[in-house]
Amino acid sequence: MLGDARVRGQTGVLSERRGSYPFIDFRLLNNTTLSGEIGTKKKVKRLLSFQRYFHASRLLRGIVPQASLYLLDEDYLGQARHMLSKVGMWDFDIFLFDRLTNGNSLVTLLCHLFNVHGLIHHFQLDMVTLHRFLVMVQEDYHSQNPYHNAVHAADVTQAMHCYLREPKLANFLTPSDIMLGLLAAAAHDVDHPGVNQPFLIKTKHHLASLYQNVSVLENHHWRSTIGMLRESRLLAHLPKEVTQDIEQQLGSLILATDINRQNEFLIRLKSHLDNQDLRLEDAQDRHFMLQIALKCADICNPCRLWDLSKQWSERVCEEFYRQGDLEQKFELEISPLCNQQKDTIPSIQIGFMTYIVEPLFERWAQFTGDTPLSENMLNHLRRNKAKWRSLLHKQHSSSRSNDHSGQVTGSQEQTLNEEETP
């Protein structure tokens, strides 16, 4: 009904047009759930055409002249530059950096990292074109998402930078590997709608149909990135076969972030480590480890300092709860982890750490050889998990007390919000 939003380029890789992603319009969803069909074709096309225009318009997407980066006074800019000098440190505060850069953390960070890694010189990139491309990426994230926004992309990119510097990997990386890793980190969730794949499937969203219910969001992130690369012409000066390879490898990296493929990658990584047959001189093995590095960067929040980790945990759960509220409003089955009345933040985080984060990061530490960074991350992970367990215990104790007394006292409520080390 909505047509195919993809465009085939000279290289044969399908990309998505800028602004082709129709926002999830809940009036349409409401009509669908109540009547079983989405109104007339003409009305839907008219509404989506406006949505596409809204999303694609440079003015409405918030792309303003580059001078906007310098709206802050020199004190703020000086602090931002000071932070960039420590961008390789694991305690890097991306929330503070985003404030100091006036909400331009992703653009500022990537420009700096491309320069630090010598990518601008190596690939003969035009700085104006690079900046234009990065602005496209940053502005195609939805700032209204509590979690899947440009700040998350910047956080993942900073983590990826730390992983690319791990000696076991850094000694073998080529400039192409580094550029692919940073680009994939920056764009891995671009244009994320703030709901998950099951939501898109059960609401019969056009992207679910387009990608046949397989890695729906990840395919969209990849194809949207290809569209922006082509529109910006960032790599237009490179040979056709080089750009084609870059586009394909970006897809392989971004598609690896699909959480449904977690076991597939863990089993393969375990096999390589147990057999000690990783040969990082081989481009295929290097690419696999870049996939693992991106997967680690994407879910590294539990391995950050408690104050940062807690913020990310609250943000991702807020996004879950928003989806659950929508599902309840439109009489859909509430997705796992999205029921605010049953799924608490501590319980969600403990499960996430236990079944997803710990197995991956333990294998990553085995690969890196227990470097200071890997040991630091695992220590944070264990401490943060213990704190969530303590908070969960306090919630249960408060709940039992509430069952007896019929109310939670002010002191109990304050206790639930404390961030004490257990």
Image (tube, rainbow, N blue to C red):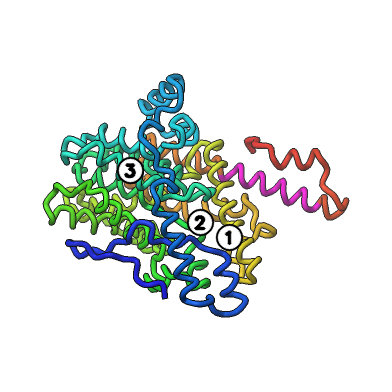
Residue 332 lies, in percent from the top left, at: 61, 71
Which disc number belongs to residue 273? none
| Element assignment for label 3 | helix
Asked if marks 3 and 2 touch (Cβ < 8 Å), the reply is no
- Secondary structure state at the residue bearing disc 2: loop
Three-letter code, disc 3: Leu
- Going from N to C along the chain, the mark reached first, 2 or 1, is 2
Q: Earlier in the sequence, mark 1 or mark 3?
A: 3
Q: Quadrant of residue 272?
A: bottom left
Looking at the picture, tell me which residue is in the foreground, 347 or 29.
Answer: 29
Where's residue 141, x and y in %? 43, 49
Which numbered disc covers residue 134? Answer: 3
Disc 3 crowd rating (10 Å Cα; few below 14, some 14-19, many 20+) is many
| Residue 253 seen in the figure | yes
- Residue under circle 2? 194
What amino acid is at disc 2?
A: Gly
Q: Which mark is residue 323?
A: 1
| Among the 4 quarters of the image, the one containing residue 19 | bottom left
Residue at (38% x, 39% y) in the render: 158
Q: Which residues are magenta?
A: 385-400
Nearer-N-terminus badge (3/2): 3
Q: Nearer the viewer, mark 3 or mark 2?
A: 3
